Image: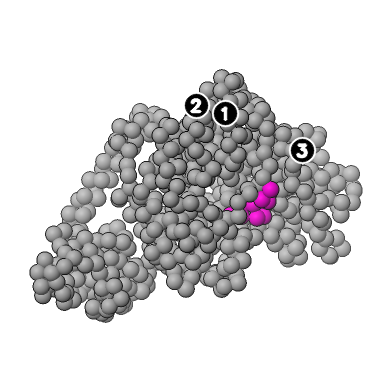
Amino acid sequence: MKVLLANPPWVTGDRVGFRSNVRWPFTISKSEFERGKGASYHFPIYQAYTLAILEREGFDVAAIDCSVNLMGIGDFVGVVERLAPDLVVLEISTPSFNTDMATATAFKQRVHVPLAVIGTHVTVFHREIIEKHPSIDFVARGEYEYTVLELARTLQTHGDLAEVLGLTFRRNGDVVVNPDRPYVEDLDALPFPARDRYEWWKYHEPTYYALPWITMISSRGCPYRCTFCAWPQTMYGHKYRVRSAKNVVDEMEYCIKKYRPGEIFFDDDTFTIGKPRVMEICREIVQRKRGVIWSCMGRTDTVDREMLAAMFNAGCRKIKFGVETGSPRIMTEIKKGLDLSKVVGAFDAARSVGMEVHGTFMIGLPGETRDAVKETVELARSIRMDSVQFSIATPFPGTEFYRQCVQNGWLVTDRWEDYDGNFGSVVSYPRLSKVEIEELLCFANQEYESRRKRDPIFVRFEKEARRSGVRGALRRAAESVMLRISRKIDNILHSVEDRRSVTLGWGWYPYDNDEGGRPIGSHSTVRLLVDAPDRTLHIIARAPRGTESAQLQVFDGTALLGTVSLEKSWQEFTVPLVGPQSTELSLRTRPTVARRKAGYIRHYGAIVKSIEVR
């Protein structure tokens, strides 16, 4: 019997999506994909485990990952026809769901074999999917490797499907939900993933240390209760299970001999849980004298300098810390439980032993406000790290975050394809709207990049040379210099402020050549130095292109200083100021135009040409 596992097509318009082994499935533009030389961001390691288990039990297996080569639905179905499997298993995600169902329908019209689906989304909605989608025959819920194995074995022997734990299926028009399958307890008993079934060298994340990149997992389950994290709540639970140090390093050694990786990445939710276990893995690596570079994910409250030093000595050169928020109130709300006063120290400790450090933060968590987002950005700016990621918080089905959104009416869409954190927000809160969340993602990145603590230029050059060679590093350095020069020229030619008395604060988009000015969204701040009494603020502004009118208001705190109605042509208006004093004003407008530029959704409410104090 032949079993095919597939990461099915996810190409929509000018975008390509990534779902397999991705905690938050997302899309990127095809041009960005091509700049990355067609690299898929995540290796489908759980599918590879499933293939290895099936192979060990004597099944013929095959794999297709459509994200690697932009394969469309028609081409995918054609390849499946040629491979002629007896069972096909597709991985499904929330934002790709409609595309996946179209794939399943096209598949069943031409290939008449059983079709099973796996993944977080189908685990949550398993009954509904079997009821409403006749092209789907089976749902393998949760941790699916052994469910797929038993399904294949039962189909091969014409056994009783009701005995396959973790399976939902259709029988005589009725939906049958078998009992849940217990989680895999003995991780050492699993075979190593069947990486050879994939073009394994094409997988790496954007923040890789060295190529080629190999993904490994040393544990499953997460004992923490973050409300937003989908996998522990839908796939492999909160019970923490680990592989032995010997088994982990055996696989590392196997990969080193067979694939010669530049870097091994441990994709555990938190590799650094349990100091004795981590130290044992490090000792095992050192004893075997395997000079391998590796990286992992950790929590700032599960590391100390001794552990980090041992990890570095064993080859760990990069660690990712998920911080998510800089607000103590939001940290409590999302149940992550980090002590924010110790976050900077953990980053510093990792860098002090020689590691590179990546930090992740989220915008749009439940209960968040503009001030809470500013706390997050201020914390990120205070940390010396090598790379950072700000993301829009997305409530995936099956999470406590999603249930909160449903119960409180925070969701603003019923389209699954909108659940792409790389594209926009699907929530709107009483004190932070969808538009503001999307604005603040852009502003957080701008503010961080403009004011973050940077390494010396020679250190940055050395890191880039290690990743892309000396020529690549020189090219990137030249591009960086040219970008800085162009920004300086833009600021000189298109400055909207008199630098002697006016400084732009939060909430300003980059100068837009199409608009001929600097766009603003919901709130933009202006810091003023009023050096004499009876001064006046002069602003030249207009409505964004594509709109007939707009309204711009000027506030000093909560006090409204002035309102002007804007039209399509430039208008000058004045606001009296009381001084002498330094002050910070906010310009507020209701965004009327949404444009996607440089990877962000920008919401324009007004275009400002100049600001001046006279």
**Whether residue 361 is visible:** no
Residue type at the position of mark 3: Leu
Q: Looking at the image, is 267 positioned above or below residue 378? A: above
Foreground residue among 105 and 503: 503
Label 2 crowding class (10 Å Cα cut-off): few <14, some 14-19, many 20+? some
Residue type at the position of mark 2: Asn
- Along the horizontal axis of the image, is 137 left or right of 569? right
Is there CB contact under 8 Å for labels 2 and 1? yes
- Along the horizontal axis of the image, is 517 left or right of 210? left
Measuring 39% from the left and 58% from the top, which residue is drawn there? 375
- Residue 282, numbered label: 1
Quadrant hosting residue 145: top right
Measuring 52% from the left and 29% from the top, which residue is drawn there? 310
> Upstream in the sequence, badge 3 or badge 2?
3
- Residue 592 on image: x %, y %: 37, 72
- Residue 5 on image: x %, y %: 70, 44
Q: Secondary structure at mark 3?
A: helix
**Magenta stretch, residue numbers:** 229-239
- Residue 313, numbered label: 2
- Residue 99 on image: x %, y %: 61, 58
Measuring 49% from the left and 66% from the top, which residue is drawn there? 367
Of marks 3 and 2, the one in the foreground = 2
